[in-house]
Image (spheres, helix red, strand yellow):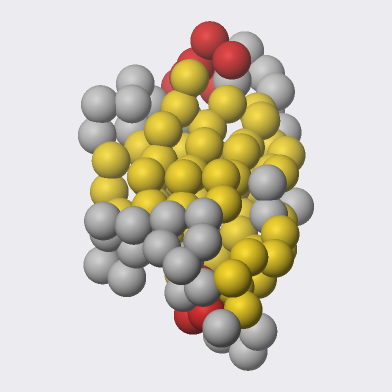
Amino acid sequence: QVQLVESGGGLVQAGGSLRLSCAGSGRTFNAYAMGWFRQAPGKEREFVAMISWNGEDTYYADSVNGRFTISRDNAKNTMWMQMNSLKPEDTAVYYCNAHRETAATTDYWGQGTQVTVSS
């Protein structure tokens, strides 16, 4: 089992930057692909970014590609997302996700961290 705790959210002006962190517990952290999702008020949760278990592959939603960078350090059981050039439409609760597909699909979620971008 993996427990995830996000941090780093806050209030920032448009054009600013934030760095989100996701700390994972458990010895199998490096067995999981890790990702960030977000949910704005009145909207469904949406994919933001993902990084493979070994950090070699990354994927981004078109809306954040070129502005956000996802990374991880398995030795520290931690994942980050650097968010630059933030826009008001980036305002949402951001959730950390651990994903693994073996015989079954397993997903773990953090509690979320609020990011608010003012115009």
Residue 51, percent from left and from top: 36, 38
Give the vertical position of 31 relative to 59 (above or below): above
Along the line of sight, the residue nearer the viewer: 67 or 76: 67
Residue 74, percent from left and from top: 49, 16
Can see residue 105?
no
- Quarter-of-image position of residue 33: top left
Q: Quadrant of the C terminus?
A: bottom right
- On screen, residue 62 versus residue 51, left or right, reads left
Along the line of sight, the residue nearer the viewer: 113 or 107: 113
The residue at the point 69 percent across, 37 percent down is 4
Give the vertical position of 30 relative to 93 (above or below): above
Taking the view exactly as shown, the residue that stands out farthest to the bottom is 42
Along the line of sight, the residue nearer the viewer: 23 or 33: 23
The residue at the point 62 percent across, 37 percent down is 22
Can see residue 81?
yes
Q: Quadrant of the N terminus?
A: top right
Residue 9, percent from left and from top: 68, 54
- Quarter-of-image position of residue 26: top right
Residue 97, percent from left and from top: 55, 46
The residue at the point 58 percent across, 26 percent down is 78
How many labels were placed on the picture? 0
The residue at the point 56 percent across, 52 percent down is 18
- On screen, residue 10 versus residue 20, left or right, reads right
